[in-house]
């Protein structure tokens, strides 16, 4: 488990056993995946024998719960991965071998196949992640991949090129803060709005896409059979599980990133590539946990509630019985939904209330900082929320 979460356990005086178990499982699966992928590429002579996993052309990157260190039990978490082209590939056949390396990594790590979305299992271009930000060329796909690369990705093969790409994306967002006027750098203190706006856009996109998928993957009524009955070739949609993940792990990934982007203002320091790279090298829950360093004891209650709920959901998602019970729920307010689903949905409401309490808190952050322009009180999370998330 990440050191920031270990420190939070000590500060709260309570353990987070399910999050620790999930982090340990993720670390084990990551090691297995790396070993299997490297073995395949060495056996097929794509990488010379005795070398590491870096060839500077291609890499293998994992996303999702494996990257967030929130891995569920065997065969319950998907192995969401992509082959990344870091530069022009001299031998196109190597692309297929990297894909096969991904399949072998998935099997050796005991993970499920990636979802049916075209985002995973294919190849993506690193230069596009850097260059296509905003305007018409920034499609839903390119935006999603860029945000996933920043918020929740981990290198299976070629960590060096993965880190270079993350840094390049950050440099792109910070471009206006690195120029010079009359020989003086235009450094910025505070919140990097360009990046923040794209992070918020992604969270809204995730929520919209959930509803869009309900339209494109309908739950067939009685008499039609289920999707996956042999006529369609598709599995039944797991709406109940998707809904709960959206309102728990997906939301927590978003708020963890918000803390990272608020941090330069909280620390009263310049926004730099190095600071943000360090932030995005952490899993999302570790990013969220570090706000504890800037809360007094009287402000810790909502943060404690948030992490207790996160730990509870980590336990839920690790249970095959839970997943099987909640997945078939067609609508979150269906009167005949299983009580297990209703209880979990109520817990997502508790999470929402705790997050609202935390981000609207007006108590001064520690150490005390000057208020934002136009405010009288010392800096608080409530001020940052009002200034950067409302308008």
Image (spheres, grey):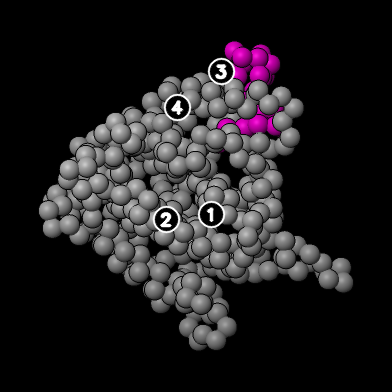
* Depth order, front residue of 356/241: 241
* Depth order, front residue of 287/11: 287
Q: Which residues are magenta?
A: 39-61
Asked if disc 2 and disc 1 are in contact, CB closer than 8 Å, the reply is yes
Q: Main secondary structure of the magenta part?
A: loop
Tell me the element at label 2: helix
Residue under label 2, please give it.
209
Residue under label 1, please give it.
140
Give the class, few, some or many, for how many residues have Cα within 10 Å of label 4's Cα (few <14, many ≥20). Answer: many
Asked if disc 2 and disc 4 are in contact, CB closer than 8 Å, the reply is no
Give residue 76's position: percent from left, percent from top: 32, 34
**Label number found at residue 106:** 4
Give residue 71's position: percent from left, percent from top: 38, 38
Q: Residue at x 55, y 66 (%)?
A: 197
Residue under label 3, please give it.
40
Query: In terms of sequence position, does the residue under pointer 2 or pointer 4 come before the other?
Result: 4
Query: Is residue 262 in the magenta section?
Result: no
Quarter of the figure with residue 230:
top left
357 relative to 220, above or below: below
Q: CA distance from mark 2 to mark 4?
A: 26 Å
Q: Residue at x 72, y 37 (%)?
A: 87
Left or right of 241, for residue 145? right
Q: Residue at x 67, y 51 (%)?
A: 130
Query: In terms of sequence position, does the residue under pointer 2 or pointer 1 come before the other?
Result: 1
Give residue 161's position: percent from left, percent from top: 67, 37
Asked if disc 1 and disc 4 are in contact, CB closer than 8 Å, the reply is no
């Amino acid at each position: 488990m990440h050191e920031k979460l270990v420190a939070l356990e000590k500060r709260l005086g309570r353990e987070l056993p399910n999050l620790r178990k999930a982090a340990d499982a993720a670390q084990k699966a990551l090691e297995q995946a790396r070993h299997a992928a490297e073995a395949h590429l060495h056996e097929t002579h794509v990488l010379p024998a005795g070398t590491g996993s870096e060839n500077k052309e291609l890499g293998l990157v994992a996303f999702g719960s494996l990257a967030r260190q929130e891995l569920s039990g065997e065969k319950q978490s998907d192995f969401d991965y992509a082959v990344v082209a870091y530069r022009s590939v001299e031998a196109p056949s190597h692309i297929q071998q990297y894909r096969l390396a991904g399949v072998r990594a998935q099997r050796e790590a005991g993970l499920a196949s990636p979802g049916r979305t075209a985002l995973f299992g294919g190849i993506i271009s690193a230069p596009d992640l850097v260059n296509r930000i905003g305007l018409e060329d920034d499609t839903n796909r390119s935006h999603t991949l860029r945000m996933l690369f920043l918020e929740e990705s981990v290198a299976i093969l070629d960590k060096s090129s993965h880190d270079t790409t993350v840094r390049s994306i950050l440099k792109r967002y910070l471009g206006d803060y690195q120029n010079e006027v009359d020989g003086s750098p235009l450094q910025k203190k505070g919140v990097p709005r360009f990046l923040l706006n794209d992070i918020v856009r992604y969270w809204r996109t995730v929520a919209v896409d959930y509803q869009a998928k309900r339209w494109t993957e309908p739950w067939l009524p009685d008499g039609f059979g289920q999707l996956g009955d042999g006529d369609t070739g598709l599995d039944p949609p797991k709406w109940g599980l998707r809904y709960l993940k959206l309102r728990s792990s997906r939301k927590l990934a978003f708020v963890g990133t918000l803390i990272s982007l608020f941090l330069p203002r909280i620390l009263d320091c310049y926004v730099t590539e190095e600071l943000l790279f360090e932030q995005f090298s952490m899993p999302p829950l570790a990013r969220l946990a570090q706000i504890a360093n800037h809360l007094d004891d009287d402000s810790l209650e909502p943060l404690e509630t948030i992490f207790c709920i996160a730990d509870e959901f980590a336990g839920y998602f690790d249970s095959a019985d839970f997943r099987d019970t909640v997945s078939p729920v067609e609508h979150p307010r269906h009167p005949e939904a299983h009580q297990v689903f209703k209880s979990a949905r109520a817990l997502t409401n508790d999470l929402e209330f705790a997050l609202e309490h935390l981000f609207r808190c007006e108590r001064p952050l520690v150490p005390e900082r000057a208020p934002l322009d136009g405010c009288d009180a010392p800096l608080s999370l409530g001020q940052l929320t009002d200034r950067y998330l409302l308008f």
